[in-house]
Image (cartoon, coloured by chain):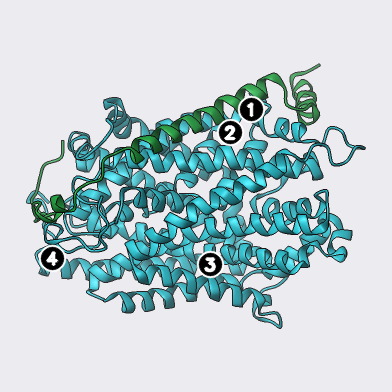
Amino acid sequence: MVLHEVLLVADATTSSSGLNAAGLTVMVVSIGSVLSLVSYCLYRVLSLPPVEVEEHIKGPLEIEPGGSEDAD
Amino acid sequence: MADSKQGGPGDGGRELWGTRIGVILAVAGSAVGLGNFLRFPGQAAQNGGGAFLLPYFISLLVLGIPLCWAEWTMGRYGGTKGFNSAPGIYSMIWRNRFAKYFGAIALMIPLVIYMYYVVIEAWCLGYAINYLTGALVSPEIKGQGVQGYENFFASFVGANGHGDNFGGNAFLLCIVLIAFGLNFTLIYRGVTRGIEKFCRVAMPVMVVLALIVLVRVLTLGTPDEAKPDQSVIGGLGFMWNPQFEKLTDFKTWLAASGQIFFSLSVGFGIIINYASYLRKNDDVVLSGLTSSSMNEFFEVVLGGLITLPAAFIFIGASVKDKGTFSLGFEALPNVFALMPGPPALGQLFGFLWFSMLFIAAITSSVSMLQPVIAFLEEGFGLKRHASAALLGLISALGCGFVLWFSEGLVALDTFDFWVGSVLLFVLALIQAVLYGWAFGIKKGEEEAHKGAHIRIPHFVQLMLKYVVPVYLSVVLFGFCVQNLPGYMTSIGENPAARGSIMFIGAVLATLLLLVHIAGKRWEAQGRLTYDDKD
């Protein structure tokens, strides 16, 4: 069989063959990675201590006047 | 962060996000939209199934997240200099008198996208209402199968002829007005009391609605015993089984990069605006990573497990060739109608699904208005009600244009390609160069880590300076080579497409003029200074 015929058969087979081992692996790794990342991020964010309001009211002026700073 | 809608004396009295989680949910809300649930699954199915995830995750790590961090950093920096709009922020990043004009692109993109996105948002609301009334599960439409839903969609959106939306059936127009009203109500209330408050409720609601539909889809089993392949497992296989030979096709890598791009809302001019409402020492690194990961949750986990498996179970492999709108508004309604159990059950799930899509669309569309509102306020000293009214008028004109030239959705499609695709890449490239070469990665790294709760690896800065601009240029070039000839032909053949291009040109020209005037005002106020060498 020439290559493109092999690919067509593989494509057709893949479409109707159910979830194969490779597909299961891709699905579990992808979903697992995303869930791990979002869980880690949300955990870090939600476990941060709240910032005191006074820190902002008494803080330095937040709008800085424009002053040229050289880029590297 | 403490709750405060306006900063205290130390913040210069400017508008600020109320809470840390609020800005994260707002940015995530901006990113999460129909593309997560409809475009991603379609792109994966057409580009190698599970194999698509390899270029997809590479693009996320090399392109998406680094560009997000750059945009968050530049936005916060511009905000501390007193600017919330892209023209002003770019002028602070690159102290050159031409910098502000690039900001016009960052205003135009969200504005023009809003003009058609609110129409799509109205479709979602309209479909949810039609599920509530039972119109989309009636025996008449069910009896026609997919064709019935295709006819319904074409009629509903006015795709059969220009001006159809302004004919006898004003239902869609009423829905668009409702969507407009909701968007502008949220915008008028401001960043904290409007956008943030809404997103803090809307995002969890979206998760709950999507999970309900997900559980339903994963428990469908094999609805038609005569088609044993069309089962839940078959549907998951259809989505996730890898076709590795597709990895040798440039189109697959192009599609993956494009999907990451659109999905994360990088280069929209929105993140840079949202981040400008942060305080000087508010974290951008962890926040940027969190909002990006939340977007990936909606896309890979929910979008990857719901849309295509559900469609495959009832429609089969032909669903692979369906575009975003066809999948969302023709195939899926057919799926809900065919779900086993009493018709009311399919009606319920259809209502929940399209309600979820509507909420996803609102959190995105409202974010598209804020950059222009910010510009009108700080560029011309307009108060909120005046800037909202002016923006309402401009966007209503554009929205009316899209609704009128609805035959074959030509105006929507033209806006989406030239502004929502090509110009997006252009702006992302501009921002990558501004960050890497004008602002500088040394300063960028220092700025990004102010208040940061996690560190960005140093090699990411090097990627932003050297790799990302090249990567984007290659993707942009390939994108243009692949898609541009077809679109140029359609412009030549279609007066409505030509008119849409002229409309885009008129919007850009107007924005450039407004930016020029605003720039003069800022110079007169002493807010803009340029490097002496310029």
Q: Are marks 1 and 2 in contact (CB under 8 Å)?
A: yes
Label annotation for residue B252:
2
- In three-dimensional space, the C-alpha distance between marks 2 and 4, rounded to whole angstroms, equals 47 Å
Q: Closer to the camera: disc 4 or disc 3?
A: 4
The numbered disc on residue B523 is: 4
Could you tell me how far apart the alpha carbons at marks 1 and 3 are, in whole angstroms?
A: 35 Å
Q: Looking at the image, is mark 3 or mark 2 earlier in the sequence?
A: 2
Question: Percent position (x, y) of residue B340?
Answer: 83, 48
Q: Which sits earlier in the primary sequence, circle 4 or circle 1?
A: 1
Left or right: where A38 falls relative to B232: left
Say which element carries label 2: helix
Residue marked by disc 3: B500
Label 1 sits on residue: B246
**Pair 3/2: label in front:** 2
Cα distance between the residues tagged 3 and 2: 29 Å
Q: CA distance from mark 4 to mark 3?
A: 34 Å
Tell me, yes or no, whether dots 3 and 2 are on the same chain. yes
Residue B86 higher or lower than B93, as above or below = below
Res. B135 visible in picture: yes
Q: Which chain contains the residue that carries disc 2? A: B
Judging depth in this view, the residue of B391 and B282 nearest the camera is: B282
Seen from this angle, which residue lies furthest right?
B226
SS state under label 1? helix
Is tag 1's residue or tag 3's residue first in the polypeptide sequence? Answer: 1
> Circle 3 — which element?
helix
Closer to the chain start, of discs 2 and 4, is: 2
